[in-house]
Structure formats: structure tokens, C-alpha cells
Amino acid sequence: MTERWRRGVFLAGAAGLAALLLWGLAGLPGFGRYPGPYGDIINRIAVAQTNATGVVSAVNFSYRGFDTVGEEFILFAAAAGVATVLRHLRGKDRISTRRAALDRVAPPASDALRMAALAFTGPVIVLGWFLATHAQTSPSGGFQGGVLLTTAFVLVYLAGQVLLFRRVSPEDLTDIAEAVGAGGFAAVGVTALALGLPYLSNYLPLGSTPGAVSSSGTIALISLLVGIEVGAAFLLIIGELVDQALLVREGGT
Amino acid sequence: MSFLPYVIVAWVLIAGLYGVVTSRHLVHQIVCLIVVQSSTYVLLLAVGYRTGAVAPYFYDVPVHTPAVDPVVQALALTDVVVEAAVTALLLAFAVQAHKRFGTLDPHELVQIKG
Amino acid sequence: MTGLLAVTTPYTVPAGVMGVLQAVLLVLTGAGATAVVLTRSPVRQVLVLSAYGLVLALLFMVFQAPDVTLSELAVGTVALPALLLLTLARVRRREK
């Protein structure tokens, strides 16, 4: 009875919410009729000011760089939270990953899966680095490149090689890489302060051609650091969850 | 057509909330939260769209081509990656809840005190 | 600056085609979200979520946002299902 009562109350509330939402959205200027001046101004001056042809990355790392610092530290805090909760859980069991992996009873990965993982790991790493370093030229950027870098390591795990996965992504290394990425981003901003400029302003040489890899100053550098940080954060999270999934209980909690 | 994206945004939001309210498994609830978040990405991109315009990348088109709004794309882009990390934190809490209380049913978890 | 603009780039598609693509993908998004919510078994829901991520990525593509497409592809089809399936494996192991 409570189940149906709860559902009825929710549907009544949802009807009211939907009515309010649609009434509010009807006040927008319609789909496809973008009126606002801000986007047009940025599109017109971004290439000339920052020598970066990828305007979205220029907005992310230069014009709205402060928002990106905030988002990156949300990522950092979430990864730290996952590590805190799950390492505390694992510490009580005190079984090493190596022994748990050797005791593991899992169906072996099929040959097709192992071939696919083997074939794709290299290209995925190359693609991830390409995306992380080409933020200023084409649709790429640190965030996408970082997630793709993690995907390469996940492919190693999917091929059934748990010990190899743990060996190529040791805990200490991922912790250090994540700290270097996040701290590096903050350091780039603070260096601008030390030079007497506002926080996170673009102080490196802008390069000559718009849209080359070496142009656009701090945007390229920040994109690389963000790629390292995002990749390390996701690798840390997935590594913690893999360790959790490997734990073989011997009776008891 | 000019109002369809907003109708879909409202629909996805309400559907996700319905899933959260009537769920019996914590991981199912977390996935429904992901659906709710995806409605905001669609709303952000629909607000910045301009009919007949190109993507805001001027590598091979001249600079004064009419393009869509790049600012909302920048917001949506970082949004997608960060929400995945926050989802991971929620999943860690779900694992912790399972270890402490042995159940992942939200209705039973509410009744546990202390 | 309303209505159709006389933009001719090497990649221009007739505006009618783009409108139809957007409408179709929007309806698919609504249907996909409903499917994700109504799937009760968590493991199956993760697979439906992966397909929904793919539909979302295509939708972002026809909204002229290739950056967001790359993000959504990498996150919604690989990273999120990996996290969810690992959590489900951890949870299910306790129930054995």
C-alpha cells in the first residue's frame, strides 16, 4: 500500500514539476534561434587573441579557466574520496592483491577478447595522447584524452591479465601522476600571479600560426596536465574497484 | 520542432526521477541519477544551437563563419567527465553500505538505525 | 540573425536533413532514457545504459558539438559501465 501511495504522490508532484519546467522553457527564444552576444563575441576574437583554432578548448582553459580548475578539483576530491573509503574497507581484510588474483576462480577470457584487447591497447594510448596534446587545434582536449588513456589500461584488465594490470598501474604511480596533474594546473595559475598578471592568464609565447601544436601558450600545457590528471584519477578509481572485486572472502565480513 | 528538445529534456528528467523514487536497488538508483544528469547536457547544448551553423572550430573554415555557442559546449564537456567521478564516489558508498548492512535495498536501509 | 543562414562550407548538409536527424535522435533519447529507467535488473541496466550513451553521443554530434561527443563516448560507453560492473561484481560476491 505504501508503494502505490508513494508512486501516486510522486506522479502528482512530477506533473507539477513538468508544468513549471515546460512553462519556464517556453520563455526561451526557441530551438535554433540563438540570440546571445557572448558566444558570437568569443567566436570572433578567440582565434586572434589566443592563436588557438579550437575555441571550445580556449574557452575551457583560458577564458573560463577558473571554472575548469574548480571542476578538476572536484575530480581530484572524488578520486580521493573513493580511495579513502575503499582502501579503508580493504585494509581490514589484509589480503594482498597478488594472492587474491592467483586464487581467483573466473572463466578465462575468450581468444577473441584477448586478441581485440591486444590489438587495441597501443592505438588507444596513441589516440589518448593525441587528444590530450591537440586541444587547441581540433575537437580534442585534456578531459577526453585522459579518459581514453584509462581505457587502454581497462583493456589490459579485460583481457584477463589482472596481475599485469596491477603491475602497469601501481598505486603509488597513479597517486603521484594525479597529484602532478592537479598540482601542475594550480602551479601554472599561480606562476601567472608571480609574474604580476591575473590568475591563470596566458603568459607563455603564443606561437606564430594559429592552430599549430606549439601555439596558444598555456592552453596546450594545461590541456596536457589535465589529461594526465583525469587519466590517473580514473585509473585510481578503477584500480580500487578491481581490488574490491578481487577480494576472496575466507568466511566472515 | 522548435520546442521538441525542451519537451525531451523535461521527459528525461521526470523519467529519471521516477526511477530514483521507485527503485529497489542502490545501483539501479545511481544509474537513474546518471539519466537525470544527461538531461542537463541536452538542455545545455539545445540552448546554444543555431540553425545552419557549424561547430566552433576554425581550423578549416574562415573565422567569421556563423558557429554555435562554444561556452555551453565547454560547460557540458567538463560536466560529462566530472559526473563520472562523482558517480564513482556514490558507488564506493554503495559498496560500504553493503558491507555494513548486508543489503542494497533502499527501503530496508532507511529502517536501519545507527 | 534568425532562420537559415547562407553558410556554405565543405561540410554543409541541407538544413532539412539536419532537422530530421535531430528530431529522430531526440525521440530515441527519450525512448532510451525510459528503457534505462524501466530495466530493473542492474546488470542488464548497465548494458542499456551503454547503448543510451551511444545514442546521446550521436545526438551531441548532430548538435554540432564534437568535443562533447568524444567525452560522452569515452565516458558513457566505457568508463561508467566498467565502474558499475565492477561494483556489481563486488556486491554479488558477498551474496554467494
Image (cartoon, coloured by chain):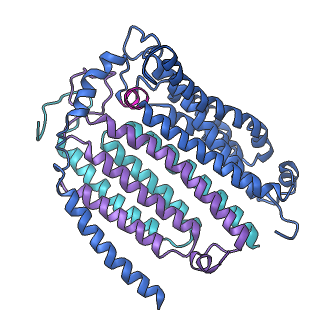
Chain colours: A blue, B purple, C cyan
- Specify whether residue A60 is painted magenta: yes
Q: Quadrant of the C terminus of chain A?
A: bottom right
Q: Quadrant of residue A32?
A: top left
Q: Measuring 37% from the left and 30% from the top, which residue is drawn there?
A: A59
User: In the rendered structure, which segment of residues is drawn in magenta?
Assistant: A56-64
Percent x, y of residue B91:
61, 59
Count of numbered labels shown in the rendering: 0
Determine if residue A197 is in view. Answer: yes
**Residue C79 drawn at (x, y percent):** 57, 48
Which quarter of the picture shows residue A235?
Answer: top right
Relative to A74, is B70 above or below? above
Check the image and name the residue furthest to the bottom: A1
The answer to whether residue A200 is above or below residue B4 is above
Picture layout, residue B19 above or below residue B38:
below
Name the one closer to the observer, C21 or A33: A33
Please state which of residues C7 and B46 is positioned toward the viewer in this rendering: B46
Q: Is residue A170 visible?
A: no
Q: Going 58% across and 68% down the picture, which residue do you hit?
A: B26
Q: Main secondary structure of the magenta part?
A: helix
Image quadrant of residue B112? bottom right
Q: Residue at x 44, y 33 (%)?
A: A66
